[in-house]
Every structure is written in C-alpha cells, then in structure tokens.
Image (cartoon, grey):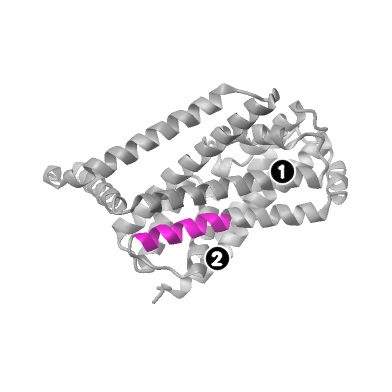
Amino acid sequence: MKRLLVALAVAVGFAAIGLRGGLPAPREVLAALGDADYGWLLLAASLQSISVGAFAFQQRRLLHSLGAHLRRGHAFAIVLAGTAISISMPAGPAVATAFTISKYQRAGATREVAAACVVVSGLASIGGLALLYAGGGIAIVVGSATTLQNWQPLAVVAGLAALTTATIMIGRRYARRLSLRRFGAGSGVRQRLWIGLDSALDAWKAGTELKVRDWATALAYAVVKWLADLTCLIAVARALDLPIGAMTLTSIYLSVQIVRQVPLTPGGVGVVEFALLGALTTAGVGGVTAAAAVLLYRLLSCWLIIPVGGIAALTLRHGPDIRP
C-alpha cells in the first residue's frame, strides 16, 4: 500500500511536469470544476467502473474456460491491483504481468494457464481497440466529420489487428507441434533463455484450448472495456458543457490512444494529459474547461485506480480464494 501511495505521488509529479506551462491558473480550473454537472460526473465514474469490471469479468471467464475458477471479488482485486502496478511503476506492464500470473497461481491456476490468460487478454485488448477504431472510422466517414481525422492511427491499429489475427491463427494451428525443450542444452544465459521461451510456448499451447466462442467473449469484454472508457470521457465533457460533439471527442480519444500505448512514462502520465489538453484546445475548447476535463477524466481513469488498487492488494494478502 505504501509503495502504491508513493507511486501515486510520483504519477502526479509526472503529470505536473508534463502539463507545466499548459494549464491555466488553478483557481480558474477549480471554478470550472465547481460548475460541473454532478449527475454526468456520477455517470462518468460508473462508466469507468464498468470498464474495470469488464476487464475483471474477461479474466475470470478466460480462467474458467481454461479450467481455473476464481471468485468474482478475488478476480476484481487482482485486476485492480495489477492495473495500479501497471500504470504507476517503471516497466509497470511487465511487473503487473508477473504479479497477475503469481496471484492466479495462488488461486489454483497452473503457471501455463495463468500466463495463457494474460496473453489472450492482451490479444483481445488489441482486437477490441481495433474494432473501436473501425467503428469510429466508419462513423467519421458517414458523419463527414473533419476534426482530427488522421489515417495514421487507423493504419497502426489495423496493422496490429492483422498481426494479432495472424498470430492467433498460426498459433492455434501449429503450437501443439512445436517444442523447444530439445534446444535447452547448455548452461547459463542460453539455458535460461530457452527455458523462458519454452514456458511461453507452454502458455500459448494452453491458450489453444480455448474455443472460438471463448475468444469471441474475450473480445466482446475488451470492446466493452474500451467503449466504457471512451464514454467516460464523453460524460466528463458533458458535465463541463464542452462545446464539441461526441464524434469529435471520439476522434480525440482514438488519436490519444496511440500516444497512450507508448510507455514513455508509467501509465502515460503527463504524456496523455498533455496530448488530451492539446487536442481539446485545438478542437476549440477553452483552456480552463479543457484542463478541467482532462483532470477529471484522468482522475477517474488513472489516478484513483492507484490507491484503490493498493487497497485491493492488501485484501490479496489473506491467501488464495479458490471457488469450490
């Protein structure tokens, strides 16, 4: 808990550095926040909870499909703690992955099954974001919107989606024919490398046990996660009465997601805030209300998750919670 609170302070520091010189006076921002519609803010918080919940339900469903069973509350605690680690620490995604796998093992999953769940979840997340881009691109074309249209983000996500699809198809067809153990002779770094690769292959083989409907369900949960996060931003904009439509906000959100995936800082803190602020002001939003919107959205989608994840991590100390 103490480490995650320190991480929260560091995250706020990164945000302050990234936004330095780009924010209006704090008094003006606070005044804008005071005029917010709290009904919309409550909806925004609920949508962010749905986003986290969709991720937790996806993890639980994948583990169940692979033969491991977690209680709902235990799955939520692991997801919250892992997300807090991912967005608050240097090399956070790698640390969070190791943490999540270890907690799934304590809950009764084999290492291969736990790793397979994490891998499949990551692939589904890429696929869900790609579907969101596809839907947003179609809506932009149909609506003839011009604000922030850019083909580069669409091309990047389309390439990632194609690569992900090819990986899944090839893996499902050939994974069980492959084995790296015969190359593991030797000692030192080389042996550890082959052991690591072989463990990854075992995890992927476990993932091939999933049926098509399991992959489809994981993808659906990923779409809900991303869509709820997007609508959280839209609800925040409505709470502050931003003078831009949902289509423009969708364009902004999808553009910023490309920046968000580059791990320049933990959780993109500072970088994402600056990108969002710049995009909103470019779209015609005043500096004060744009800053208030960015602060509220990032508070709900990032900063608050760190202390909540710390509390969730404390609940995990009581040992495994295996569903009978």
Residue 241: x and y in percent read 83, 42
Residue farthest to the front?
142
Q: Give the SS element for disc 2.
A: helix
| Quadrant (top left, top right, bottom left, bottom right) of the N terminus | bottom right
Residue at left 54%, top 55%? 54
Residue at left 48%, top 44%? 125
* Residue type indicated by callout 1: Ile
The correct choice, above or below, for 60 with respect to 272 in the image is below
Q: In this view, does 241 lie to the left or right of 225?
A: right
Q: Give the SS element for disc 1.
A: helix
* Front residue of 151 and 270: 151
Residue farthest to the bottom?
324
Quarter of the image where one finds residue 248 = top right
Mark 1 in CB contact with mark 2 (< 8 angstroms)? no
Whether residue 9 is visible, yes or no, is no
Q: Is residue 204 magenta?
A: no
* Residue type indicated by callout 2: Ala
Residue placed under numbered mark 2 in the picture: 312
Residue 106: x and y in percent read 37, 68
Residue 304: x and y in percent read 65, 55
Please give the range of residues in magenta. Answer: 52-65
Q: Is residue 56 magenta?
A: yes
Residue at left 57%, top 60%? 309
Residue 88: x and y in percent read 56, 49
* Front residue of 39 and 267: 39
Residue placed under numbered mark 1 in the picture: 234
Real-space CA distance between mark 1 and mark 2, rounded to the nearest whole angstrom = 28 Å
